[in-house]
Amino acid sequence: MREPSSRAPAPVTHFVISQYTIVVDGTKSQAVLQGFVSADARAAGRKPLAHRAVDLVGTPEGDTLQWLYTALIAKPDGELAGAAAVFEEAT
């Protein structure tokens, strides 16, 4: 018999949008987030520790990803309410 591990799971602190869906009637959008321990863990190719699907009212205007991140942070009952946004340009 083995003793239970004393290591607590690492907190997920870095979320990125991995995919999104826009409903064509203009009523809602959905963002699927992947959660990592840190930006460094993501950059190192580590697997995400969490996945979240979040429904949002409305559809994007202008830059889709920027609209989604802004809506996620502004959603008062969401997990990311009030989070600091870090926007990375694709390279």
Image (cartoon, helix red, strand yellow):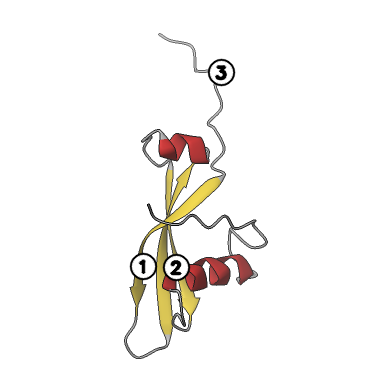
Q: Which of marks 1 and 3 is nearer the N terminus?
A: 3
Checking the image for residue 44, the label placed there is none
The residue shown at (49%, 17%) is 4
Front residue of 64 and 57: 64
Q: In this view, does 49 lie to the left or right of 37?
A: left
Above or below, comparing residue 12 to residue 67 in the picture: above
The residue shown at (41%, 76%) is 29
Front residue of 22 and 89: 89
Query: Which structural element holds mark 1?
Result: strand
What separation in Å lies between label 2 and label 3 (alpha carbons)? 39 Å
Q: Position of residue 8 (x, y in %)?
A: 56, 27
The residue shown at (53%, 46%) is 14
What separation in Å lies between label 1 and label 3 (alpha carbons)? 37 Å
Q: Which of marks 2 and 3 is nearer the N terminus?
A: 3
Above or below, comparing residue 47 to residue 14 in the picture: above
Residue located beneath label 1 in the image: 20
Residue located beneath label 2 in the image: 65
Q: Which residue lies furthest to the front in this view?
A: 91
Q: Where is residue 2 in the image (x, y as percent from the top left)?
A: 43, 10
What separation in Å lies between label 1 and label 2 (alpha carbons)? 9 Å
Q: Which of marks 2 and 3 is in front?
A: 2
Mark 1 and mark 3 in contact? Answer it, CB < 8 Å: no
Residue located beneath label 3 in the image: 6
